[in-house]
Amino acid sequence: MIAPLATCLFVVPLADGAVTLLPRLTLVLCAGVFGALLLRGRGETTTALVLCSVLTFACMVSSALHLLGRRATGVFVAVAVTIGWFAEQMGDTRGWFFGRYHYTDVLGPKIGAVPFVIPLMWFALAYIGYVMANLIVRKAPTDEDSTAGEIFMQSLLGAALITAYDLGADPYMVYVVKAWIMVEKDGGWFGETVQGFVGWMTVAMAILLLFRAMVRRVAPVPVTRVTRRDAMLPVLTYAGFMLFQVMLGHPIETRSIAAFAMGIPVLAAVAGWRQWRVAGAAT
């Protein structure tokens, strides 16, 4: 229910009252994400996994509506969900992008061969990567007026941040959660194939590049409606995922990997956020 409710905001004009409500809604949803993460840590169940994924999606949609505006958020969701579902469907059925694998029933109902929460998480992670890459490079959460070269480099960085998350998430989801079964293995990453990371970079890069190309001429949200707290929420969500992997990652070696692969970008994004000084921005 949360995902459709959040999505319906794309077609409803954002009145002043809605603009005021969105940051509060995002905070509530963000708290729900961390609560769901704690629930997952106590026991892996389909309900906890689906709840965490849907809440993460809804939280990032609410954040994006406030930072990017209704039109740009609608484009971002459409691009990420469509490309994410297609890539996963082709991966499960034909072995494209990530190597051969098959989803189990752990992640709940499916659209085709893909659990419905997977495309939602592609948007959530892509949005987090987008905001963090902008904070690191531009010292601001959005990137209007970027050149073609800047768009490429920031999309590449965003894709790398998304893939850094998967370094620990992939083996955990396979060996602990058993969300999917890898058919094709080369032993290059804790018994798994490294091809999956090539797929993550490729798909994430495609999402970020296409989104940026489609919204280059969309008017930015008035800066007076954006607060520094709003720009920090995607970073905090990424940091929450990092802490989960540091505490519960499997195999145990992935815990140290997550601390550095995800921790360094978090520190860099926080440093960029601290330097964000936009005339008229709320605090």
Image (cartoon, rainbow, N blue to C red):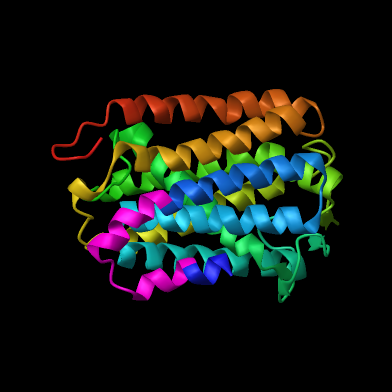
Q: Quick check: 193 above or below 272? A: below
Asked if residue 99 can be seen in this view, the reply is no
In the rendered view, does 247 fall on the left or right side of 55? right
Residue situated furthest left in the rendering: 279
Q: Choose between 30 and 164: the one closer to the eye.
A: 30
Q: Position of residue 124 (x, y in %)?
A: 52, 53
Q: Choose between 14 and 94: the one closer to the eye.
A: 14
Identify the image quadrant of residue 273: top left
Q: Quadrant of the N terminus?
A: bottom right
In the rendered view, does 162 fall on the left or right side of 101? left
Q: Main secondary structure of the magenta part?
A: helix
Q: Quick check: 130 above or below 88? A: above
- How many discs appear? 0
Asked if residue 81 can be seen in this view, the reply is yes
Q: Choose between 8 and 79: the one closer to the eye.
A: 8
In the rendered view, does 128 fall on the left or right side of 120? left
Query: Residue visible at 80% across and 34% down?
Result: 250
Q: Position of residue 115 (x, y in %)?
A: 71, 66
Query: Residue visible at 30% across and 43% down?
Result: 150
Query: Residue visible at 39% across and 67% down?
Result: 75
Q: Choose between 22 and 99: the one closer to the eye.
A: 22
Identify the image quadrant of residue 218: bottom left
Q: Quadrant of the C terminus?
A: top left
Instruction: Residue 229: say if magenta.
Output: no
Q: Position of residue 2 (x, y in %)?
A: 55, 65
Please report the bounds of the magenta region as a residue range: 6-24
Q: Position of residue 251 (x, y in %)?
A: 82, 32
Query: Residue visible at 42% across and 47% down?
Result: 130
Identify the image quadrant of residue 157: top left
